[in-house]
Image: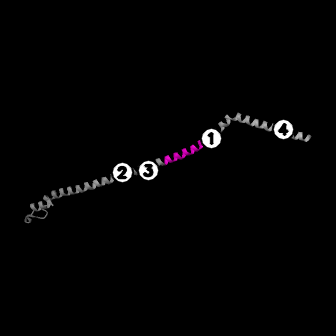
Amino acid sequence: MLYFFRFFKNFNNTSDLITLSLDEEFKPVLKENMRVFNEYETNDVHNIKNQISNIQNIIIENIEKILERREKIDILVNKTEKLYQENINFRRQAMNFNFHMWLENNRMTLYFISSIIIFIFFIWSLYNNNIYILNSYY
């Protein structure tokens, strides 16, 4: 607006005007005004585009981090399942090993107890047979 008033102040006399005579005088003013206003809009638009670009980059980085985190969680879940299965197998093997060790440690005791039981059964059967035999004679 200021340029407009300055223009009329300098060029108010219309009798001196010839077609395109103001072109040389007004052209630098118009050029400067266009540069200033275009630069202002360009700077704002450029700043907004930069901000949008920065926001897009941040969003993309966040999405990548989320995907990496998801992959890590999947890996942890798989490792946990594998450890659980290994735990079950280890327990089975430990129980089997424990039984075999107990059997190895107590094998002689079991042999001794079973031989005593067999001996007692043998004595008992002989005693019962002798009773039957003695009863048959009487």
Report the amino acid beneath label 2: Ile
The residue singled out by tag 2 in the image is: 58
Disc nearer the start of the sequence (4/3): 3
Looking at the rendering, the stretch of residues picked out in magenta corresponds to: 74-97
Quadrant for the C terminus, please: top right
Give the class, few, some or many, for how many residues have Cα within 10 Å of label 1's Cα (few <14, many ≥20).
Answer: few
Predominant SS along the magenta part? helix
3D distance between C-alphas at marks 4 and 3: 85 Å
Residue closer to the observer: 133 or 1: 133
What secondary structure is marked by label 1? Answer: helix
Report the amino acid beneath label 1: Met
The residue singled out by tag 3 in the image is: 67
Question: Can you tell which of label 2 and label 4 is closer to the viewer?
Answer: 4
Disc nearer the start of the sequence (2/4): 2
In the rendering, which numbered label is found on residue 127? Answer: 4
The residue singled out by tag 1 in the image is: 95
Direction from residue 125 to residue 19 in the image, left or right: left
Give the class, few, some or many, for how many residues have Cα within 10 Å of label 3's Cα (few <14, many ≥20).
Answer: few
Question: Can you tell which of label 4 and label 3 is closer to the viewer?
Answer: 4
Residue closer to the observer: 18 or 34: 34
Disc nearer the start of the sequence (1/4): 1
* Number of callouts: 4
Magenta segment includes 83:
yes
Give the class, few, some or many, for how many residues have Cα within 10 Å of label 4's Cα (few <14, many ≥20).
Answer: few
At a point 49% along the width and 49% down the height, the residue shown is 74
3D distance between C-alphas at marks 1 and 2: 55 Å
**Residue 23 in view of the camera:** no
